[in-house]
Image (tube, helix red, strand yellow):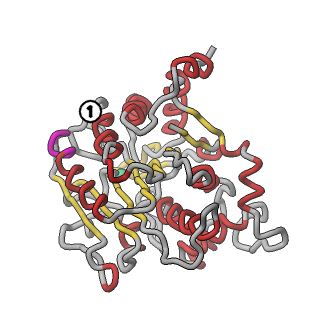
Amino acid sequence: MLVLHHPATLDHCIIEILNGKVIPAYECPQRISTILNTLEVEGRHELRDTSKNRQNGEILSEEGPGQEGTWLSATTPVLTRRFIAESHDPGYVEYLKTIHHEWLSFLHTAISSPREPKDILALSRPPGHHCTTEMAGGYCYLNNSVLAVHALRHFHATGPGHDSVGAPPKIAILDLDFHHGNGTQDYFYRDPSVLYVSLHGKDEYPYYTGFEDEKGDGPGKGSTWNFPLSVRTSAEVYIATLRRAMGIISESKPTYLVVSLGFDTYRMDPLGSFAIDTEDYETIARTVSSDLSLKGVPAVILLEGGYVLEALGQNVGSFLRGGRRAELKDSEVKKNQRQ
Ligand SMILES: [Zn+2]
């Protein structure tokens, strides 16, 4: 699988208050570095630093120079800013002064080869699915999956084989973070072109959303599906529920799949309470990737939570082993492995 990362995600150590104590935040740069270290040692996946992708910068700036706005860095690619503006309240975006200007660039790579769909995993940091149009939440400042949907729609209307006059493409979002993606659900709650399906901890953060009877509203009625699961849910129950979720996604016949992938479902996670082990992530990925009705549907997988540094790299590696076109050939592995 193609794994995209950006050096900006290795910045920003923060603190948080948890259980009345000030501690180094669980959401830390080492989350990304430990994943990269593990995957580099394995050598089985193509890792790409998107800050080195000059062609991407040119394409993202296709609307031409001189259109820079005032609310983000002047070097921020035009399309990146447009997607952010379309996905978030302008007043809220104004508040964000430290946005990294190339963080969205992975999307270009994900969607630039529609004839040969390529699944990608973007090591996005911080996570995004709790962010609404007007409010940050749970480490999330920008909603990565909402941005991905905007980018996919843009590509669908302008890319090779584009469909500029038809209806927006059907996009399914599968949210596998331990916590309910309230921001993502909220954004698409009335939108029939986006299916949102979430498996998450019952009565856990953010506490007030993620119930089974939240089904969407107006034209979006029936496009939201929540599967809240109890504390200490086993891998067997989780995967059986995931199969039901995949049935709903298959039935919607999506053109693109976006996966909000959290590893705070891991057994030892300090912010989750499921009983999922490292090897189970391979089965979880296989359950998603083996759905034949989704064959040929490009998948954009976005990192959400996951806070056990000692296991995070192995958990990601396990998930990638279950993915489509999961690994490089042995000859390529040798070339990739660290000397
Ligand atoms: Zn989470």
The CB of the residue at mark 1 lies under 8 Å from ligand 1: no
Q: Which residue is at 34% across, 84% downward?
A: 219
Query: Please, which residue is most extreme toward the right here?
Result: 66
The x and y percentages for residue 317 are 42, 31
Q: Which residue is mark 1?
A: 277
The x and y percentages for residue 245 are 24, 56
The x and y percentages for residue 163 are 57, 71
Q: Quadrant of residue 29?
A: top right
Q: Height in image: 310 above or below 75? A: above
Q: Which residue is at 45% across, 59% downward?
A: 256
Q: Which residues are magenta?
A: 234-239
**Is residue 309 visible to us here?**
no
Q: Is residue 60 magenta?
A: no
* 232, 22: nearer the viewer: 232
Q: Which residue is at 48% across, 77% downward?
A: 167
Q: Which residue is at 51% across, 52% downward?
A: 126
* 262, 23: nearer the viewer: 262
* 37, 117: nearer the viewer: 117
Number of numbered markers = 1
Examine the residues drawn in magenta and state their main secondary structure. Answer: helix
